[in-house]
């Protein structure tokens, strides 16, 4: 994997945000807010940190694996997969359309390269990632397993069953990241079901916890992932609390849950795209 400069990576982030907005606008369906907030994470992972192969093999032998538990961020993930060579960028225009491989939530039935499990039924992804991580250990595969979850998703009980299991069995080839934006579909997490002190919670469950305080700064995100990687292999699973702003990059979308499941109209799209330079070419 050829390393790129922060400036080059930032251009990919900007283009990814354009892709996301155009995808959800075209079908007037989808979730723009959280993918905009996670652009730096997706780009840092796929273009800087992840040992992966766009010549996709489902078993992922000898490469790092990534699972998206909060599957409603699919537009962002699809954009990064396409821009890193998994399938043609032109295919992004089929997002959420009939007979498309780019379903609203990622699914394996369509055999889209890069997708190893159907996701979006919240709370299940960490269990899947644990199974993959243990399989790598059993197979003598020294590569890592990454997973992204939402903070609202942590209100699901299965997450905490998996958290307890991971620590008990010392699954230390796993790096979990929580998109900690404080928003979910019905409002702020503090009002829907307050998460309180997440760092203390994960530590109490036996995890090694790091915090990436500026999850919308590429340098900080990369440094956080590198720190997480340095802590693997030491007997504990790793939790990366990634503080992001939902809707980041578009001034009228930042910091509100209102763009969770709400696409922009024509006027809003034009205003949003006016804030995001076309850097790699629109599909």
Image (cartoon, rainbow, N blue to C red):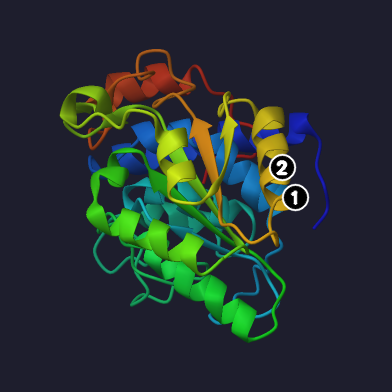
Asked whether the viewer can see residue 264, the reply is: no
In this view, 100 is above or below 46: below
Relative to 166, say whether 183 is above or below. above
Give percent across and percent down for residue 62: 70, 77
Q: Residues within 10 Å of mark 2 (few under 14, many from 20)?
A: some
* Count of numbered badges drawn on the protein: 2
Residue at image location 51% in from the left, 74% down from the top: 132
What residue is pinned by disc 1? Answer: 230
Eyeballing the image, is 207 above or below 243?
A: below
Badge 2 vs badge 1, beta-carbon distance below 8 Å: yes
Which element carries disc 2, helix, strand or loop? Answer: helix
- Residue with the mark numbered 2: 227
**Horizontal side, residue 81 vs residue 148: left or right:** right
* The N terminus: image quadrant: bottom right
Pick the residue in front: 281 or 237: 237
Seen at 29% across and 39% down, the residue is: 152
Question: For the residue labelled by badge 1, is the local secondary structure a helix, a strand or a loop?
Answer: helix
Give x and y (percent) for residue 101: 37, 67
- Quarter of the image for residue 175 reads bottom right
Residue at 23% from the left image edge and 33% from the top image edge? 262
Is residue 199 left or right of 140 when viewed as pictured? left
Instruction: Give how far across and how far down residue 140 sits, in percent.
Output: 70, 83
């Amino acid at each position: 994997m050829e390393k790129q400069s922060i400036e080059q990576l930032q251009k990919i982030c900007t283009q990814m945000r354009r892709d996301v907005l155009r995808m959800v606008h075209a079908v007037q369906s989808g979730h723009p807010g959280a993918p905009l907030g996670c652009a730096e994470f997706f780009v840092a992972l796929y273009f800087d940190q992840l040992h992966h192969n766009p010549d996709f093999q489902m078993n992922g032998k000898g490469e790092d694996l990534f699972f998206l538990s909060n599957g409603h961020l699919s537009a962002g993930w699809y954009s990064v997969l396409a821009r890193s060579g998994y399938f043609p960028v032109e295919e992004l225009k089929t997002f959420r359309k009939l007979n498309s491989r780019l379903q609203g939530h990622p699914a394996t039935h369509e055999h889209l390269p890069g997708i190893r499990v159907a996701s979006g039924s919240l709370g299940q992804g960490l269990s899947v990632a644990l199974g993959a991580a243990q399989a790598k250990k059993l197979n003598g595969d020294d590569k890592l397993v990454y997973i992204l979850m939402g903070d609202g998703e942590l209100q699901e009980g299965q997450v905490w069953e998996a958290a307890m299991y991971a620590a008990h069995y010392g699954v230390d080839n796993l790096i979990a990241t929580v998109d900690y934006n404080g928003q979910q579909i019905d409002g702020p997490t503090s009002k829907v079901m307050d998460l309180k002190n997440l760092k203390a919670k994960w530590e109490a469950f036996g995890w090694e916890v790091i915090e990436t305080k500026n999850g919308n700064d590429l340098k900080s995100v990369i440094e956080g992932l590198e720190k997480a990687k340095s802590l693997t292999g030491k007997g504990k699973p790793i939790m990366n609390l990634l503080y992001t702003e939902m809707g980041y990059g578009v001034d009228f979308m930042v910091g509100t849950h209102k763009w969770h499941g709400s696409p922009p109209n024509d006027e809003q799209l034009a205003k949003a795209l006016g804030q995001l330079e076309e850097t790699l070419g629109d599909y």
